[in-house]
Image (spheres, grey):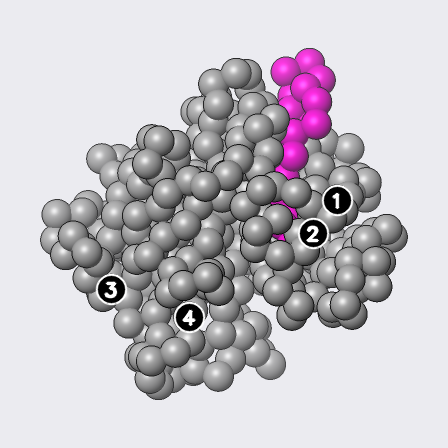
Amino acid sequence: MARLRLLAAGVVVLTVVALLVVLLPRGSDDRRTRTSATDQHGHQLTALSVVPDPDGDGWLGVYHWPTGKGPADFAVGLATSKDLLHWDNVAELDADGGNMPVLQRTPDGGYLLAYEDYVRVVEGNAISRIRVRAYADRARLLANTWSTQRELPATLSDNNEGTPSFARVDWNGSPGASAITLRFHYNAGADGIDRQGIGTLRNFRDWTAEPDRALDETLNAAGFPASHGRRSTFRAGGRPWMLIEAQRRPHDFSSWRLVLLDRGRAPRADPVSVCGGDDDVPSAPSVGVPGVEVASGGSGTLFLSAFVFDGPAAGTFLARRPMPADPGAEPQRIARLFARCAPAG
């Protein structure tokens, strides 16, 4: 996404709000959603990415907030939660430019962290790269003691490469013996348009990447020819899906929407409307930065985080709901999980 607007706004890529899900199980305060969400210190929970916490019945989440120190200064934090709506910060993972983090557990109980890192500012333009870290276990994650880290070299853009997400992890017992495939966005030229890329980090040393032209073309054909940014993948109805932020008009933050992509044999894209969830939560005129988690066990829980750019609910939006036992595999039924209560525009 257009980084300068993001930075100028003091928040990262979006404006959350009533986004996604509308019918979640009620939390301890009888809410299903939360708008303008922050941790206990008042830090924005921007780009919240969550995984189940093996120590108890709760969750671990990584996110970022603006520090106010400059145009490229953000901090990445780690927090815990019991209900997915209220989060307590337990560690600061990067205090100098880190943003858009994602977290994933490894089969041996460790964690992988990937995030966008602003490495320098050139003539007012913040330059970012992707950073990947490996933590051996939960205790070391909370202590921010990583076993290894790698700043990935620029491959597709001299300006910005960031908003990573884990596409696949072939774990062979250690970072140095594994292959980690990431999706990301990159700045495609001087006009500030962001496009999608995909790459693999092998042995935590060798990084190769290429444009994901098929994904960009799918979004263009769906009516979103401007920037394409953060994405989150999940499974529902026995099939893979992706929720991705996409822009209808260049440099127009009011035109950011969430787009649902069917990642099955015949990929397709449908605009997804946004809504408030609880009765007093307004619909969002513009929203992005999605994060989706589908938890197993019992009836399961569908969790969504997003960022609302404008309107009375601007900021981080969180929502949770029971996952139907059989949501079906049709795009319309999956889209209804994210509540159609406002036009996608």
Upstream in the sequence, badge 1 or badge 2? Answer: 2
- Give the amino acid type for the residue marked by disc 1 in the picture: Gln
Compared across the picture, whether 331 is left or right of 198 comes to left
Q: CA distance from mark 3 to mark 1?
A: 37 Å
Q: Residue at x 74, y 48 (%)?
A: 147
Residue under numbered circle 2: 134
Q: Nearer the viewer, residue 290 or 177?
A: 177
Q: CA distance from mark 2 to mark 4?
A: 23 Å
- Give the amino acid type for the residue marked by disc 2 in the picture: Ala
Upstream in the sequence, badge 3 or badge 4? Answer: 3
Helix, strand or loop under label 3: loop
> On the rendered image, what quadrant is the N terminus found in?
top right
Upstream in the sequence, badge 2 or badge 4? Answer: 2
Near mark 2 (Cα within 10 A), the count class, few <14, some 14-19 or many ≥20, is many
Residue span colored magenta: 111-127
Upstream in the sequence, badge 3 or badge 1? Answer: 3
Foreground mark, 3 or 4, reads 4
- When asked about the image quadrant of residue 9, the answer is top left
Helix, strand or loop under label 1: strand
Helix, strand or loop under label 2: strand
* Up/down of 227 relative to 56, above or below: above
Compared across the picture, whether 1 is left or right of 174 comes to left
Compared across the picture, whether 289 is left or right of 263 comes to left
Picture disc at residue 295: 4
* Up/down of 334 relative to 213, above or below: below
Residue under numbered circle 3: 24
**Residue 191, x across and y down, in percent:** 64, 31
Upstream in the sequence, badge 4 or badge 1? Answer: 1
Q: Are the residues at dot 1 and dot 2 in contact (C-beta closer than 8 Å)?
A: yes
Is 124 magenta? The answer is yes
Q: CA distance from mark 4 to mark 1?
A: 28 Å
* Up/down of 249 relative to 200, above or below: above
